[in-house]
Every structure is written in structure tokens, then in C-alpha cells.
Image: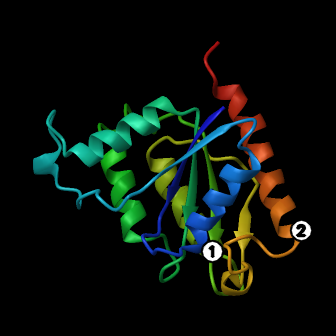
Amino acid sequence: MKILGISGSLRTNSYNTKLLEISQDIFADDHQIDIFSLCEIPLYNADLDTDAKPVSVTALIDAIASCDVVLFATPEYNYSISGVLKNAIDWASRPAYESVLAGKPAGILSASRGPVGGARAQSQLRHVLAATLTPVLPQREYLLPFASEAFDESGNLLGENMTRRLERYICQLIEWAKDFQVI
């Protein structure tokens, strides 16, 4: 299965991007997980939303269109998702009800330094994705609280339990997403 990872953090050592990179390593033999950087996506501007969209936006839309499932990794900023992630979704969700996100299965990971692991951001992201008609793996979450203490110097998760939880979540996402594949 082809999975597109999108991190809502631009930070060089982002915990959320690390979760996507670890997922790449875990599933390297069985599934393709590509990570799309949002660094070059301009602020949404309807005046630019024409057939000649910015190159980075076209690349994002093409990447979403060509994957089987989108795996969002969201930080929590002020009880919500980052502006960077919301902006990318705004670009990818056009035209409304017919965008590349409509009907595209998705999963959500989150890591934060606090005790709830990004749960509020996940809730907000579910609302945003519902508006784009993007189905999200129901009743499953991968939350990583106290993320600043969860990784070693090399960026690996400390403790087998956290890695197993991540692997189990993505396995559930893959199984669920198979129902969306066109035969």
C-alpha cells in the first residue's frame, strides 16, 4: 500500500515528523510511506487557486491523488492543529466535494510535550477532515504524550511498547483503508 505522510510541523527535529520516519522504517519491506514536506506551500489565496496553481501545491495535490491513504502527523498548537497543516488541507480540499481528499482514507498520529499527546489537535483535525469528506480511521488514535522524553538521540522511540503501539495503529489503518481501494 502507498501511504503519504504529512507532518503538520516544520520544525527540523519535529516529534511528529519523527513518528512518520519511524513508520517508514517499520514498514519499509511491506509498504511505501512517502513523507511530503509542507515547507514550500504558500498561504492559501483564492486568487492563486486557478489551473496554474503554485508548483508546490500541485505537487501536494498529485501526491495525495497517487497514494492509497494519507497519514497525518499533527502537533498541538493552542488546542488545535498547526496553521501549516490547516493551510495545506485548504489547498488540497479544492474544489469542494470533488477534491483529492474527498473519499481518501486517512489516519492521524500526534505527539506533544504535554500529557494528552495532541488529543485536542486530533479532535480538531477530525472536524477539518470531515468538512473535506476525508474518512478517518474511526475510534483509533495514536497519541504520544511527553514526546520530549520519548525519543533517544538518534530519533528512535524509547521502549518497545511505544513502537508496537505505532506499528499496531498503522496496521489497523492499512487494513481499514483496504476497503476503500478500487478493484
Occupied quadrant, residue 164: bottom right
Q: Secondary structure at mark 2?
A: helix
Residue 93 appears in the figure? no
The residue at 23%/61% (across/down) is 43
Number of numbered discs present? 2
The residue closer to the viewer here, 138 or 67, is: 67
The residue at 44%/32% (across/down) is 65
The residue at 76%/51% (across/down) is 26
Q: What percent of the width, then of the height, locates residue 74?
A: 55, 66
> Is 176 left, or right, of 70 in this rendering?
right
- Which colour assignment does the render follow? rainbow
The residue closer to the viewer here, 85 or 39, is: 39
Confirm or deny contact between disc 1 and disc 2 (CB under 8 A): no
Amino acid type at mark 2? Asn
The residue closer to the viewer here, 175 or 78, is: 175
Occupied quadrant, residue 18: bottom right
Where is the N terminus found, in terms of image quarters? top right
Q: What percent of the width, then of the height, locates residue 59?
A: 33, 41
Q: Which residue is outermost to the front?
A: 154
Look at the picture and state if 5 lies above or below 75.
Answer: above
The residue at 89%/67% (across/down) is 160
Q: What percent of the width, then of the height, locates residue 63?
A: 43, 38
> Is 86 left, or right, of 28 in this rendering?
left
Look at the picture and state if 138 lies above or below 151.
Answer: above
The disc, 1 or 2, on the residue closer to the chain's N-terminal end is 1
Occupied quadrant, residue 16: bottom right
Amino acid type at mark 1? Gly
Residue located beneath label 2 in the image: 161
Look at the picture and state if 26 lies above or below 76.
Answer: above
Residue located beneath label 1 in the image: 118
Q: What percent of the width, then of the height, locates residue 53?
A: 18, 41
